[in-house]
Structures are given as structure tokens and as C-alpha cells.
Image (cartoon, rainbow, N blue to C red):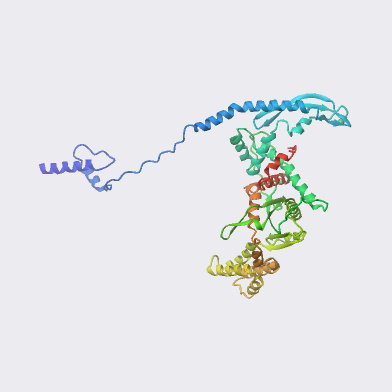
Amino acid sequence: MRIVTNILARLGRRIRIAASPCTAPAGPPSRKLRRTRHRTPKPPAGHVAPAAPVRPALALQPPSIVQIEREVIEHFRPQMCQALQHKLDELAASQTARLRPTCCNRPVPYHDRTRVPTLTRFGWVKILVSRYRCSRCRREYRPLLGFLEVEPGKVSGSLARLLGLLGVVVPYALAAELTLLFFGIHVNAMTVWRAVQRLGEPAARHMEGLAAYHEDSRSQAPPTPTPPDVVMLGVDGCALGMQVRKTRRQRKTSDEVLPPLPPVEEGRFREVKTAVLLLPAERIEPSPGRHSVVRRVLVTCLGDADAIFSRAWAQLRELGWLGTNTVVVIVGDGAEWIWNRAGIFKNHCEILDFWHAMEYAWKYARLQFGESSRCAHHFTHRIAKDLKAGKVYDVIARLKTLRPVSDEAREALKAVIKYYTDNASRMQYDEYLRLGYGIGSGAVESAHKQVVHARLRQAGMRWSEQGARRLLALRLLLLNGHWAMVDRLRMAPIAA
Ligand SMILES: [Zn+2]
């Protein structure tokens, strides 16, 4: 009996020693417990359960330097606003006599003075504006507002230009959020929209004006001491979704949610065209086979083929890149509208984009040999090699001897042969490579994506004719590195 008790006691101790989430009973364990204990596998020696994940903690406050910076801004903002107010008052006093308008063939009599609010970079100010009223026709004038490009109750000055910049880069609602983060000023998406319209209108007019000027035979190009021997011009286009309505929808209250617009019907698209101008001499090869350009100049428009060529022409003249012997190398995807207009340049060279040529070969190869098959790869590789060697007629002759395996493949083969035959004179790739011209339209495709897709072709976006025209004009200034020009544009008053 004592032996049995000893065994039980030893077993009990063992059970107590074993690592277990349950607390072992103090006395000898019951038969039932012993049975269950024996069934539970022993955890391996040194086993530790993984620690429960800790919720990531954030600092309670921003770093002191950030707090101090913000305090300083908030401290000086009212003082800056006051200083601006003071200077504007001085300006109003000095300009009043100078800006007196004339109407009905005589100076307009002074009527009264009012304070006109406007939102600036430092907050709201009130400009003291003299009002003149013609006693004959009763028309009113506030010339100081026009002089300062101020719209009563709206954003003006450098803030309007900053809002314009943000609206050119990101959608208007996001631009409004960024305005608060960057400048501590609350605005809504419509305010940003308005700034873009007011700046975009003169920017678009300036570009259209330059195109019209250079189209005229009496216009003069800026003098160019050394025009380049070769200029490359790439053209690309895409469709832009246009608004179905002529006018914007108005919310009755600020929190009213407008119902979604109906799906866009066929024909609600406009073509946007982009041209890229660059000098082959400025092309660099940062790594073998990868080409990049030091400088490229973009031209874009919402309009027909004539418009984009006339703008490219104007831009080339402005840059001084169009000498009497300059060869304009045009790279295109085979669209007829491009080649039809190449003739406006006295010396030009037409190149079919190499990758478009290869796409036709790939389409046939996939249908003939199967998707991503070795044969398809070999077939297209050989075509690419021969085309680069300038053997386009050999390639066409070889294609004509092939036997397609299906009707689809036959159609694709026909298309390749026709495309290569139509464009054979634009496929002398060995010559172009020897002369250092680019044979791909990669530069224009990436430029077009930057100008148009990155801002105007986001999900669900639709544009009015004017809205797209103005935004494109401003994006061009930014992407061509000419944003400083907006300071020299007179902001237009916009009725909306
Ligand atoms: Zn009058």
C-alpha cells in the first residue's frame, strides 16, 4: 500500500512540474485527470508561446521643431496680413488718380469708395476700391480691381497662382486638401477650379496666338545663329471623355450629393494630340540600349491634326530649331493624318515607329505559333533583326511565302504585309540608326501620358471643351519648365 502511495506521489510531482496552462491540483491527482494528462503531448523543452502583437503606438505630439514652426507661422500670419493690407491701402491711394476711366468720350466722375474683400496668401484683406459711374450711360467702373486682377470675394494674387499649380497637378478636390496642408488656408475644389480657369484661359490664348502668328508668312522667327541639323518630332493622340452637358450642374445646398452622371454615349470623346520635339544630338544612353533625352519640348492641343502641326511649327520657330537646312524627322505610328501633314516641313524624314511595326509581326506570330511559343519568339526576333538591317523588302517577300494555319492567322499575315508595304519607305531603319535618329515613338508616348493621362484621364473624369483646353495649356507650361510664365499672364475674369 505504501509503495502504491509513493508511486502516486511521485507521479503527482511530475505532473506539477510539467509546463501547463492549468494549475495542477495540490494533492495526488485523480485517476481521470491522470488519464487526460498522459494523452496531452509534452511541449518541447524551451518552448515559449509567441508574444501577442502590440498595437503600434504614435507619438503624442509632433516634434518640438514642427510645433515651433507652426507657432511662428500662426504668430506672424496676422502681422503679414496687416502689412499686406497696409501696402494695398497705399497702392490704392497712389493709383486712384492714375486709373480714372473714360466713358462716352470723357473721364468718368468719381462715385464712391468701398472695401472689397479678397483671399490672399496670408488671409482675407479688404481693398479700398474707388467706384466711378458714367452719368450718361450709368455704367460703373472699378479700375483698381482690374489692375490688381482681383475678383471680389475670391482668391487673388500669388495664392491664385499656387492653387492653379496644384490644380494642374492633381484633381481639384485633392488640390483643395493640399492647400490647407501647405498653406493653412481653407478653400474648396471649386476655388481651385476657378484659379485654373482664370490662369488657363490666358495661357491657352497665348499658345493659340503664337501658333497663329507663326503660321502667317509675315511673322518673324527669333534669330538663330546655329540652327540644328536635325530635329525629331513625334506625334501621338488619345481620346478624352467629354461632358455630356453644356453647363455645370449646380448644387442647391453645399452638402447636396448630385446623382451619378449617365454613361457616356458614343461620340462624346475628343482627340487630344501631343507632339514632342527633341534634338537627336542631345540624346544620351545612360545604360546600353536605354536612351534618354536631356531636353524635350512638348506641344499639345485639343483639336485636329492641322492644329497640332501648326503648334509644333510655331514651337520649333520659337526655339530657333528650324533653320533652312534643318531636317525634321517625324516618327509616327502609321496614322495617315501624320504623314499627310509632314509636307509642311521643307526637309523632312518620315519614320514608322519600330515598335508599331513589330506589333503587327507579333500579332501574326501569336496566331500562327501560339501565345508565347518559342517559334513565335524566333520568328519575330528574326523580323526585328532584318528590319533593323534595312531589309524590309526581303521581309515582305518572305512573309508572302508563308502558309497560315488558320483564317485568323491569314488575316493577320495580310495585315502585316499591307502595313509593311504601305510604309516600306519609312522603314529604312539601318539608315536611321546610322544617322543617330530614334526609331521608336517611346518619347512621345511617355510625354503624352504625362501631359494627358496623368491628370485628365483618371477614373470617371469628363471635361468641358474649355476646361480641357485651359488645363492642357497650363500642364504644358509646367512640364516644359515654363511655369514662371504664369506671372506674366493676365488672369482672366471667368463667369461661372
Ligand atoms: Zn458711358
Where is ligand 1, by quadrant?
top right
User: Residue at 77% of width from left, 27% of height from top?
Assistant: 94
**Quadrant of the rendering where the C terminus is positioned:** top right
Choose between 215 and 468: the one closer to the eye. 215
| Picture layout, residue 479 above or below residue 490 | below
Decide if residue 248 is in sight here: no
| Picture layout, residue 199 above or below residue 239 | above
- In this rendering, the count of numbered labels is 0
Q: Is residue 225 left or right of residue 429?
A: right
User: Residue at 66% of width from left, 43% of height from top?
Assistant: 168
User: Residue 112 at x, y = what percent?
Assistant: 79, 23
Choose between 190 and 215: the one closer to the eye. 215
User: Residue 246 at x, y = what percent?
Assistant: 74, 44
Decide if residue 415 is in sight here: yes
In which quadrant of the rendered view does residue 411 lie?
Answer: bottom right
Q: Residue furthest bottom?
A: 401
User: Residue 242 at x, y = what percent?
Assistant: 70, 48
Choose between 124 and 432: the one closer to the eye. 432
In which quadrant of the rendered view does residue 392 lie?
Answer: bottom right
| Picture layout, residue 91 above or below residue 270 | above
User: Residue 236 at x, y = what percent?
Assistant: 68, 56
